[in-house]
Amino acid sequence: MPDYTLSSILPFVRSGMRRVRPSFTLTEFVSATWTELEKSGARVRRLRPYVQNNPDNPEFAHNDDPNDLKQSAVEAWLYLQRRGFAIPASGIFPSALNDSRLELTKRGREWIDAQEPTPELPAEYLTALQRMVPNLDDVVREYVVEGLGSFEHDRFRAAAVMIGAASEKALYMLAEMMLDAISTARWKTNFNTALKRRDLAELFEQMKNVLRHANNLPGRSFEIFDGGQDHLVSLIKAVQVQRNNAVHPMNEKISDDTVRLSYLAFPYALQKVEQLRDWFSKNPNVL
C-alpha cells in the first residue's frame, strides 16, 4: 500500500473536483476524491454508487482507510482554502461562515479545468515538461524541480528565483545558437560581447532583433517562428522578476499569482525556444 501525502493525493483531488457542486461538503469532497483513487486501483471500499442528487451520503466506508490517506485528504481540504481555490460558504452573508461547506472560487474553477501543466502538481508538471521538451537540459530541469518544491511550500520568492534561473539558462542556450547564425561581423561582435559579459538588457534586445530578422527570411518555417517573440518575452519576464523583484526584496513583494503565471508559461516558452535552437543550429551564417 502506498504512503499518501498531500502531493500524491492532489491529482486525485483535482480530477475528482470536476464532478462536485459549486458548493460542497467534506463528505462530497472525499467521495469524489476516493472515486478517482478507486479508478487508479487504490484499496478503497465502496458502499454505494454515486447518486448526483444525494452527494452528502458517503459513497465509501472509511473504517479501514489508512491514517495517512485520511490526513492527506484533510490537508487537501485545507490546501484548497489556503490557495484561494475554495472558501467557506456564507449562506447568510455577512452574519456567518459555514466552515463545513466550501464554495469554489473563480481561481479554483480555473485550476480544476486547466489542461496545461500546473505548479500545484509537481510530478504531473515535470512529466508534461519532459514530454513537451524531450531533450530537457539537466540544469534547467534541476532549477524547475527546486522551484516546484519551493512553490509547494509557499516559498514564492525562492520559486521565482528558480524559474528565473531556468529561464535564464534556456535563453543563454538559445543565444549561443543565434550567435552562429549571424554572419555580419559587427553585429556578431556586438552580440558576442553582450553574451560574454552577461549584459542581459543588451543581450535580450540583440536576441529579439535576431528573431525579427530570422522571421523575415524567405522560406523560413512559419510553425517554428510563430509566437517566438511572445515566448521569448515570457522567459525574459521571468528573469526580470527573478533579478529585479525576487533577489531584491525591497523592490516588490512576490505574489503566488505572479510566480504561478511564470510556471504556467514556462513549458510552452521552453518548447518554442528548443524549436528555435534547433532551427538556428541548422542554419549557420544565415543572417
Image: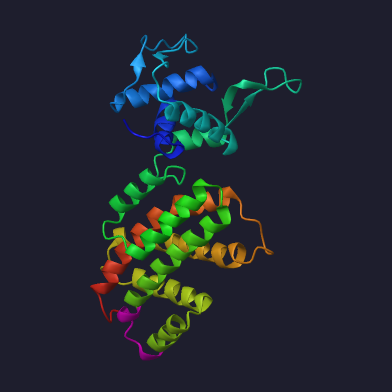
Q: Is residue 184 magenta?
A: yes
User: In the image, 145: left or right of 183?
Assistant: right
Residue drawn where x is 38% and y is 62% of the image: 140
Residue placed farthest to the bottom in the image? Answer: 185
Residue 39, horizontal then vertical, whole percent: 30, 25
User: For residue 7, what is the image quadrant?
Assistant: top left
* Outermost residue to the left: 282
Count of all numbered marks drawn on residues in the image: 0
What residue is at 34 percent from the left and 16 percent from the top? 45
Query: Is 268 above or below relative to 202?
Result: above
Q: Is residue 176 left or right of residue 261?
A: left
The answer to whether one can see residue 226 in this image is: no
Extreme right residue here?
Answer: 95
Q: Which residues are magenta?
A: 179-186
Look at the image and tell me whether residue 22 can be seen: yes
Q: Report the predominant secondary structure element of the magenta stretch.
A: helix
